[in-house]
Image (cartoon, grey):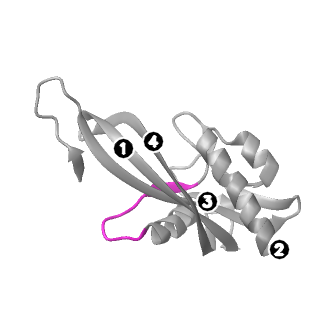
Amino acid sequence: MAEEQADQPGKIETRLQVSAGGVAFRRGPAGLEVALVRVPPNSRWQLPKGLVDEEEAPEATAVREVQEEAGVETELLAAIETIEYWYIGHNRGRRVRFHKFVHFFLLAYRAGDVANHDHEVEEARWVEISQAIELLAFKSEKKVVEKAQDMIATLDQ
């Protein structure tokens, strides 16, 4: 799904990339908690997310990726936000400019243990929501969790 192909020598190819993930939350010993994952190579704390498979809805991807990366089963409640950004990476050994969209959803914890995360994740843990906002590596994800916090507050009313 290339947005534009590199026709000229030295011009970098641009590709569209779509991911989905979620703010999985529960009421825990510390109050309102969200599931965060720490991933290599930079050991940054982030929300669980991953690429949308062909013919898979972003909602299904979010639930699947949270289960794989954070080890927990969730129920999809609502869309939170879609963030958009650009980055340079590699695809099949070639340098590529990616135009990325990440769909984030609010997910209620149902079952499972963060210790059961997959091998791509260094650590998954439940973190009190205000501490999670501080720990998150990306400003855009901090804003997503802040929006999720507001959405959860309306559920409690």
Looking at the image, which residue is at 75% across and 40% down?
134
Q: Is residue 41 left or right of residue 3?
A: right
Which mark lies nearer to you, 3 or 1?
1
Amino acid at circle 3: Ala
Q: Which amino acid does label 4 sit on?
A: Tyr
- Residue 36 visible in this rendered orientation of the protein: no
Q: Say few, some or many: other residues with alpha carbon within 10 Å of mark 3 (under 14 / 14 to 19 / 20 or more).
A: many
Compare marks 1 and 2 and give the one earlier in the sequence: 1
Where does label 3 land, which residue? 70
For label 2, the residue is 156
Marks 1 and 4, the one that precedes in the sequence:
4
- The residue range painted magenta reads 48-57
Is 138 located above or below residue 109 in the figure?
above
Q: Mark 1 points at which residue?
A: 99
As drawn, the label of residue 85 is 4
Provide the secondary structure element on which disc 4 rests: strand
Q: Distance between the residues labelled 4 and 2?
A: 33 Å
Of labels 2 and 3, earlier in sequence is 3
Residue 60 shown left or right of residue 47 in the figure:
left
